[in-house]
Image (spheres, rainbow, N blue to C red):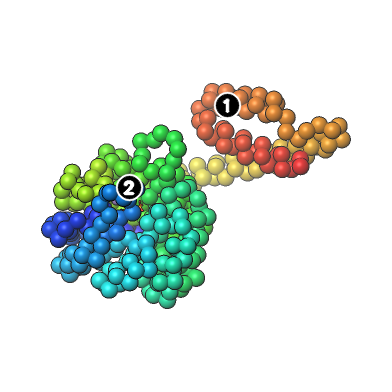
Amino acid sequence: MKKPIIIAGPCSVENEEQMLLTARALAKIPGLSFLRGGVWKPRTRPEAFEGRGEEGLKWLREAKLETGLPIVTEVATPEHVELALRYEVDALWIGARTVVNPFSVQQLADALNGLDIPVFIKNPVSPDLNLWIGAFERFQKAGLTRLSAIHRGFSYYKESPYRNFPMWEIAIELKRLLDVPVITDISHICGNRVLLRDTAQKSLDLAFDGLMVECHHDPDHALTDAAQQITPSALQDMLESLTPRTQHADSDDPVLAALRSEIDDIDDELLQLLARRMNVSSQIGEYKRQHGLTVVQMDRWKRILSEHLETGSRLGLSKELIEKVFEDIHQASIKRQL
Ligand code: PEP
Ligand code: MN
């Protein structure tokens, strides 16, 4: 397995002592890739702590000089970029609230034009894959080549145990389309300490490329995101408790080979069945057209979906899967009949 990229450090740079104590402890963890620290904090309410700005960059640079760890901070405006570069920040990240705004992203891309600095692009707050991809395109057009993604979960209208719902499938799709490293920001996904380990393991199991974890020498008294920050030693324990998985299965493994061949056969059957279903659907479409019937027959659609849900549940298939699959099939059918 490729070595995971581990980015750790406080949510916010608060003062010199906090930054140095945290950085010294983190520097003892083997395999740390970047020391993070936010100096401009995008806060929901204006009275909240909004970061130390330029002063914070001084302490971040001090931590870099003392520990030798490369440093990374969030930038949201061209002025931030200029200051970050002045204080020898090694990499930048673009926050979730900035990536939602193409004007801001374009300004940042212009400010970084032609520079060879690594940039980590967080997913936008809303689950919008194209908006995330668009941010990559703006930086690529500006000539930046060392781009990675940070998956930090999405705002979601439903109750969930997460602060930001992971929707892993969006991050998987981004990786498939852009072929960039994707780091999982377990801290902002979870919003608490309890879920961190399992979320980190899930990220490894899904073959993502690393973790971002907020660490503070005294997390309970952190000025921002106290509930989700952990001590450097808790991070070390967590990292040691994770089970690595290899991405490339041994192609000679006979058990896996047999199971995969069975899956391939089933997929083939599924495709044949889908094609047959679409054919019948076309015939029904033709019949409806000749007899002046509407394409969508709501009563029938409601009835078959509820029957499929019942059958599916008897077969141990989740409601979510059945709804998703049959809604897609039904949509494709309607399209064909139109
Ligand atoms: C952060 O990393 O501290 C942060 C503000 O993250 P996000 O943009 O993901 O909310
Ligand atoms: Mn934070």
Q: Is residue 296 visible?
A: yes
Q: Which residue is the site of mark 1?
A: 309
Say left or right for 60 vs 99.
Answer: left
Mark 2 is on which residue type? Answer: Arg
Seen from the viewer's position, the closer of residues 39 and 189 is: 39
Q: Which element carries disc 2, helix, strand or loop?
A: loop
Q: Nearer the viewer, residue 222 or 273?
A: 222
Residue 112 lies, with reference to residue 37, above or below; the image says below
Q: Nearer the viewer, mark 1 or mark 2?
A: 2
Mark linked to residue 45: 2
The numbered mark, 1 or 2, whose residue comes first in the sequence reads: 2
Position in image of residue 322 (x %, y %): 56, 32
Quarter of the image holding residue 331?
Answer: top right
What residue is at 62 percent from the left and 36 percent from the top? 327
Query: Residue 41 in the image: x percent, y percent?
Result: 30, 55
Percent x, y of residue 268: 63, 44
How far apart are the two marked residues, 1 and 2, measured between alpha carbons?
44 Å
Task: Tell me the kind of residue under disc 1.
Answer: Leu
Disc 2 residue: CB within 8 Å of ligand 1: no
